[in-house]
Image: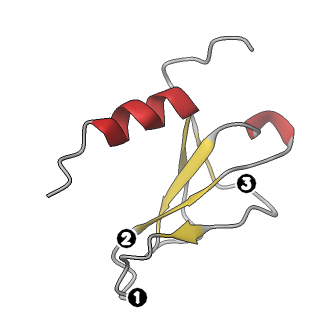
Amino acid sequence: MSPLSRNIPASTDLPGVRWLRSSYSTGANNCVETARPSAGPRAGLLAVRDSKNPAGPALLFSPESWASFTAGIDRR
């Protein structure tokens, strides 16, 4: 696998992905949703979008970048 650019793009073109929300979500659309594209040039990346704007762009992260980000979150 080739190394990914540090500038991971945003995308609004993610057909057929299954968006997931945290079980901690209150249903008030105040959370993020994630998806894992399984085909095409975005396969293997993690897509993250704002649940209040599902038609808006999703940020795309490499698995390593996402793991680093979530490891740094304070989980109080």
Q: Which residue is mark 3?
A: 13
Task: Check the image and name the residue furthest to the bottom.
Answer: 27
What's the amino acid at mark 3? Asp
How is the model colour-coded? Answer: secondary structure
Side (left or right) of 54 relative to 32 = right
Nearer the observer, 75 or 45: 75
Task: Say what secondary structure mark 2 lies in.
Answer: loop
Q: Which residue is mark 1?
A: 27
Task: Check the image and name the residue furthest to the top.
Answer: 2
Q: Are marks 2 and 3 in contact (CB under 8 Å)?
A: no
Badge 2 crowding class, 10 Å Cα cut-off, few under 14, some 14 to 19, many 20 or more, is some
* Image location (x, y in percent) of residue 13: 73, 54
What's the amino acid at mark 2? Cys
Task: Say what secondary structure mark 3 lies in.
Answer: loop
Q: Are marks 2 and 1 in contact (CB under 8 Å)?
A: no
Q: Residue 35's quadrant in the figure?
A: bottom right
Q: Which mark is residue 31?
A: 2
Q: Which mark is residue 41?
A: none
